[in-house]
Amino acid sequence: MDSFELLEEKVRKAADLVRTLRRENETLERQVEEAQSALKDAEGQLKELQDQAGESVDSDQLEELNTSLAELRQERQEVRQRIGALVELLEGLDE
């Protein structure tokens, strides 16, 4: 295999990698949107419960919502980090 064929093979592999990373990026962006939507819902539910605090609020339910909210925030952060890493990798391909 001559050097031109090697270069062609490397370009094909790089193009495949870019396509794969773009698909992964799209998937992660959808996950971020879903996590943000779930977080917004959980925050809304938490606010409703906090507004009802003067009334009889189930502390177990409130604790469960706080836990869910914390988990969703952590998940959103992890997804953002993964997207950031993919973006950096894609930007590195432009060089």
Image (cartoon, rainbow, N blue to C red):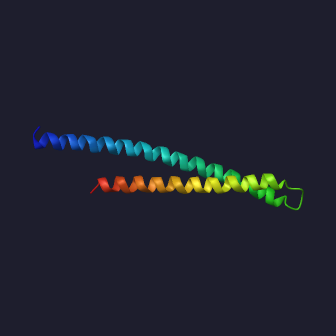
**Horizontal side of residue 7 vs 74, given as left or right:** left
Residue 3, image x and y in percent? Answer: 11, 43
**Horizontal side of residue 20 vs 81, given as left or right:** left
For this orientation, the residue located farthest to the bottom is 54
Residue 72, image x and y in percent? Answer: 62, 53
In the rendered view, tell whether residue 73 sits above or below residue 27.
below
Rendered residue at 29%/54% (across/down):
94
Residue 76, image x and y in percent? Answer: 56, 54
Rendered residue at 54%/50% (across/down):
32
Rendered residue at 42%/55% (across/down):
85
Instruction: Tell me the quadrant of the picture where the C terminus can be found.
Output: bottom left
**Horizontal side of residue 7 vs 25, given as left or right:** left
Question: Taking the image as drawn, is residue 59 in sight?
Answer: yes
Question: Number of callouts in the render?
Answer: 0
For this orientation, the residue located farthest to the top is 1
Residue 24, image x and y in percent? Answer: 44, 44
Question: Taking the image as drawn, is residue 45 in sight?
Answer: no
Rendered residue at 73%/53% (across/down):
65
Instruction: Tell me the quadrant of the picture where the N terminus can be found.
Output: top left
Which corner quadrant of the image does residue 52 belong to? bottom right
Closer to us: 34 or 62 = 62
Which corner quadrant of the image does residue 4 belong to? top left
For this orientation, the residue located farthest to the right is 55
